[in-house]
Structure formats: C-alpha cells, structure tokens
Image (cartoon, rainbow, N blue to C red):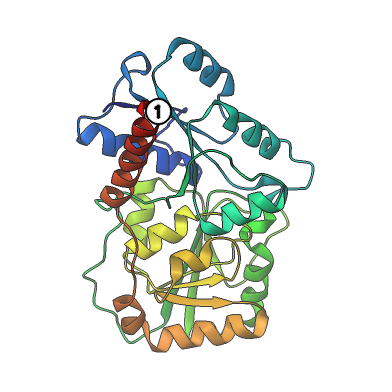
Amino acid sequence: MKFYIIASIIDSPTGGGNQFLRNLRNYFKENDMYSRYNEADVIIYNGHQFINDVQICKRLSKDVIFIHRLDGLQKLYNHSGDIRQDQAIDATKYADGIVFQAKWAKENFEKFGFKPDKPNVIIPNSVDRNLFKPSDRQRKQDKTKILCTSWSSNDNKGFKWYKFLDSALDFEKYEFHFIGNKPDWFESDNIICHSPMTTQEISEQMRGFDIFLTATKHECCSNSLLEALSSNLPVIALDSGGNPELVKDGGELFHDERTLLEKIDLVAKNIDSYRKNISILNMNDVGKMYVDFAKSLREKNEA
C-alpha cells in the first residue's frame, strides 16, 4: 500500500501541523510506502488546505482511498468568523475516512454541528524520536529550568499566563525560557525570550531543561507538548483542548493563577516521578494507525 500526502511540507521553522505531516511522510518513506500521487493507493489531505488539488486528485484517482486529517477548530482557536473551519468540514465530502487528532476535537466539531457519517478514528500526532529524546544530563541542585515554545504568536497560545508568571514566579528558584514568536504586546522582565529555532535546535534545547510549560488554549494536539514529553520533560499544561489526553500522568494541569503556581512547585519537587509516568505514542505507533485505518477503508470499499 502506497501513500501520498497533499501538503506543502517544509523543513524550516513553522507550525506543528507541518512538523507532523513531515514526520508522517518520513514514516511512509522509511517503510517504502510513499509514492507520487498518481501511483498512490491512499491520499491524505489536511484541514482546509489545498482543496483544489484534492478535487483534481479525486477526479483522476478513481480507486484511491482519501483520508482527511481534520485540523484544529479555528472558530475556537482564532475567532468565530474563521471560515477555514467551515472549509475543512465541507472538504470531508471528498474523504473515505476522517482522522480526528483528539477525542476533544471530535466532540467539539460535533458541537459546531459536524457529525461525520463516514468512518472516523482518533489518531494523535507524534514527533521525530530521533531528535526528541530523553537527555542523560544530570540535574544540578540550582534553579529549576522551565521551557515554553510556540511557533504561533496567537494570544490563545497562553501569553496572558506567561505575562502573569513574569511577575509572580519565584525567579530565585526558577529560570524560565521562551522560544518562538510572541505578540507585540508581550514584554518580559524575567522570562528569557529567544527567537524561533529550527526543529533540531529546539530538540537540543529541550534536553537542557527540567519542566515544560504550555498554556495553549483550544488546541487539538499540541506539537510542542508532544516534543517535550518525548524529551522526557514533565509538563504543566492548561486544562484545555486535547492537552489532558496527552499529559495524563506525565505532568499536571492548571485552571487558574493559583493552581498554576501550585502545580509548578508540585512538579518541580517530583520531577523524576513525573518522568517515569510519561506515556505517549511514537511515530511508528501513529504511522501504523494510519496504515490500519487505510486498510479498513479499503476492505470496506471492496466489500
């Protein structure tokens, strides 16, 4: 079975969707399962993107399975008038099967009136475990180092929480670094901010930290959160979107300013225990889930 992904996949620093699709394509290539679109048995397309190309491939590829990976809920994440969510929902008409990134995502698409009448599964994202892997660094008895990364400068990435921490966190005990893009209004006195980095650079940075913090809101399956967990970093995350489905026992969730500070202290005191409880799927697991779903759709069509 051969796969093709309709997407503009680039290697420079960019968002999590691109990162995951690149990893998925690499999985197919490594297993000799990737081909050109006109030789593929299965075509995967993503959200609202390149729908004209999907239409063309659909006309030219009569016996090909089409899988639609639904992206995030832009009406929640951006604003209620974001038509990209409507475009993505409409594009499911070309699909034989649909992939949601989280149970939360499926439930919230249904709240917007989209209840799929086609086969669908929940398959989370994964990261390149050759890059994002545990560190053998021995922790020193100095400040606990916290990291946050974000490609997007959208306010829903949690910048109000980081602004709060810039004044409320005990910087005698903690060192907080942010890597990525941030909104113009965000300035910090104590948080150390860095420009966006490549995937390779971020993976190297993560191995020098103790805790990962993300306050991203309404996100299906945070790529940066997965990168941190893959690097064996305990996570403190806002209780929103698909975050709880990823963090599980590998960290703590927070709801307000008080619990945010409490959870930081709690995780900092028990880092090794949280590390032992981290449990996520690797790229081989996730790639196989796509393959198995495609096979089930093929069998359904041939029945």
Q: Residue at x 65, y 85 (%)?
A: 258
Regarding residue 278, the answer to whether it shows in the image is yes
Q: Relative to 28, is 193 above or below?
A: below
Pick the quarter of the image with the C terminus: top left
Furthest-top residue in this view: 60
Please state the horizontal and vertical placement of residue 22, each as a whole percent of the image: 37, 37
Q: Residue at x 25, y 32 (%)?
A: 29
Nearest the viewer among 117 and 98 is: 117
Question: Residue 275's image quarter?
Answer: bottom left
Question: Where 181 falls versus 133 (above or below)?
Answer: above
Horizontal placement of 87 versus 45: left or right?
right
Q: Residue furthest front?
A: 303
Q: Is residue 32 left or right of residue 146?
A: left
Q: Where is residue 33? Give x, y as percent.
A: 25, 30
Quarter of the image with the N terminus is top left
- Quarter occupied by residue 188: bottom right
At a point 42% along the width and 14% down the height, the residue shown is 61
Give the x, y percent position of residue 168. Answer: 64, 82
Front-most of 83 and 160?
83
Counting from the top left corner in percent of width and height, residue 105 is at 58, 53
Image position of 249 with respect to 88: above or below? below
Crowd around label 1: few <14 · some 14–19 · many ≥20 (10 Å) = few
Is residue 169 visible in the rendered structure shown here?
Answer: no
Tell me: residue 210, above or below residue 6: below
Residue at label 1?
Answer: 301
Give the residue at x 37% y 18%: 37
Q: Label 1 amino acid? A: Asn
* Secondary structure under the numbered disc 1 in the rendered image: helix
Front residue of 61/188: it is 61
Q: Tag count in the figure?
A: 1
